Each structure stands twice: as C-alpha cells, then as structure tokens.
Image (cartoon, rainbow, N blue to C red):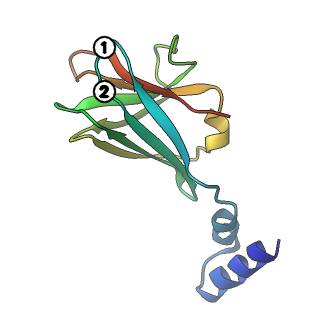
C-alpha cells in the first residue's frame, strides 16, 4: 500500500490523473509465453505480455521467420484453438511483432487463450503456438 501511495503522490506531482496513478501502481510483471513449433516448422520463440494503462502490449519474437506471418490470440489451447481469432496481432516481420490490445488485461486471457503464428499471409497453417498460463 505504501508503494501505491508513493506512486500516486509522484504521479500527482507530475500532473498525472489519479486514474493514471492507479494504472501505474496496478501494473503486473510481464508474462512470458514460450512459442513451440507446430507442424514440423522448427519455428520457436517467445511472446511477452505486459499490462499497461492502454491495454496489453504483446511482443512476439520468433527465432526463425521469413515472409510476414499473421499472428492471433485464439480461445482454447494450442491443440484445438477456436478457428476465429479473439485478437489479431501485428504480422511477425523479421522475427518480431508488437501489438497493443486496448482495454484488455492478461488475467482475462490466462488459462483460456493461446497465441498462434501462421506460416504466411497466404498459408494459414499454424507454425508456432503458446498457451497463456494461469
């Protein structure tokens, strides 16, 4: 509680609103999701999710990536995701993708969603997937 009070005081002295102070103090540690290869792709990597005042920032890093690859967050586990994405992420280009999902929180995804990367913009076979853990 003392830390939250100190952060709130600092935000106030910087001219930030009380809502901003709460958002800063309520921030959680980033969550790392291992992305495992699927379909013999050999593509692995990591997704990092971070709660921010603007929503979840999702950063994907793939070890092996060529042409732009679509990425999504789907309901369900890697073995049987809902085919309709819940959230579309920026394409993975050069092994990296960064997307902000407005108004979302990691706790809403935990244990219920997976992050999927597709082979290309014309071949939607899954090449990497990771489940957002509880």
What residue do we see at 42% from left, 26% from top?
A: 36
What residue do we see at 29% from left, 22% from top?
A: 42
Query: Where is residue 123, by image quadrant?
Result: top left
Q: Nearer the viewer, residue 106 or 34?
A: 34
User: Does residue 14 appear left or right of residue 9 in this picture?
Assistant: left
- What residue is shown with label 2? 43
The vertical placement of 1 against 126, above or below, is below
Label annotation for residue 79 = none
Query: Where is residue 107, by image quadrant?
Result: top right
- x, y percentage for residue 64? 24, 33
Q: Secondary structure at mark 2?
A: loop
The residues bearing labels 1 and 2 have C-alpha atoms spaced at a distance of 8 Å
- Give the crowd class for mark 1: few <14, some 14-19, many >=20 residues within 10 Å: few
The vertical placement of 78 against 60, above or below, is above
User: Does residue 76 appear left or right of residue 57 in this picture?
Assistant: right
| Residue, far right | 1
The vertical placement of 94 against 24, above or below, is above
What residue do we see at 64% from left, 89% from top?
A: 13
- Give the crowd class for mark 2: few <14, some 14-19, many >=20 residues within 10 Å: many
- x, y percentage for residue 96? 29, 43
- x, y percentage for residue 61? 34, 42
> How many numbered marks appear?
2
- x, y percentage for residue 93? 23, 39
The quarter in which the C terminus is drawn is: top right
Q: Nearer the viewer, residue 45 or 55?
A: 45
| Residue, far bottom | 13
Q: Secondary structure at mark 1?
A: loop
- What residue is shown with label 1? 40
What residue do we see at 75% from left, 75% from top?
A: 3
User: Does residue 21 appear left or right of residue 78 in this picture?
Assistant: right
Q: Nearer the viewer, residue 43 or 84?
A: 43
The quarter in which the N terminus is drawn is: bottom right
């Amino acid at each position: 509680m003392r830390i939250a009070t100190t952060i709130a005081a600092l935000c106030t002295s910087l001219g930030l609103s009380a809502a901003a102070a709460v958002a800063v103090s309520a921030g959680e540690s980033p969550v790392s999701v291992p992305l495992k290869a699927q379909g013999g792709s050999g593509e692995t990597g990591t997704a990092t999710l971070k709660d921010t005042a603007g929503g979840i920032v999702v950063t994907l890093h793939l070890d092996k990536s060529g042409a732009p690859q679509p990425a999504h967050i789907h309901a369900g586990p890697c073995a049987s995701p809902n085919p309709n994405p819940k959230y579309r992420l920026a394409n993975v280009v050069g092994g990296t993708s960064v997307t902000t999902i407005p108004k979302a929180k990691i706790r809403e995804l935990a244990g219920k969603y997976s992050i999927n990367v597709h082979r290309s913009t014309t071949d939607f076979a899954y090449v990497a997937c990771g489940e957002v853990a509880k």
